Image (cartoon, helix red, strand yellow):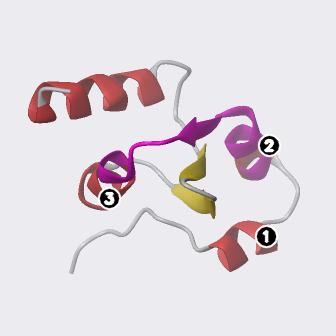
Amino acid sequence: MERFYRLTEDEFLLLSPGKIKDNMLMHKFIISDADLVDWLEENARFNYCAVPDGSNHIVFFNSPHSGAVEDLKAEYREVNHA
């Protein structure tokens, strides 16, 4: 069994107002790299929701601290030489 961090859009909408949803709304990003969104599926270490928006994705992270998303992005760049 593997832990699955990605929330569906429906799951995100069903979250009650509170700490988790507020945190995710504070950590909202536009990602234009579809490979990064796919990479998150296997490598994210906290919950997120990726919502398609044209050729981009709006991604909401339940980040444990303010630098966690930046750490994850740096790891992606290192692994993919991006």
Quadrant of the frame with the N terminus: bottom left
Q: Nearer the viewer, residue 60 or 5?
A: 60
Magenta-drawn segment: 21-36
Which one is earlier in the sequence, the residue at label 2 or at label 1? 1
Residue 30 is one of the magenta-drawn residues: yes
Residue 37: % across, % down: 39, 53
Residue 5: % across, % down: 42, 62
Residue 24 is one of the magenta-drawn residues: yes
Q: Which mark is residue 38?
A: 3
Which residue shows up at 48% across the image and 42% down it?
32
Residue with the most extreme right position: 17
Asked which secondary structure carries label 2, the reply is: helix
Which residue shows up at 76% across the image and 51% down it?
21
Q: CA distance from mark 2 to mark 1?
A: 12 Å
Which one is earlier in the sequence, the residue at label 3 or at label 1? 1
Q: Residues within 10 Å of mark 3 (few under 14, many from 20)?
A: few
Q: Which residue is mark 1?
A: 13
Q: CA distance from mark 2 to mark 3?
A: 24 Å
Which residue shows up at 55% across the image and 50% down it?
56
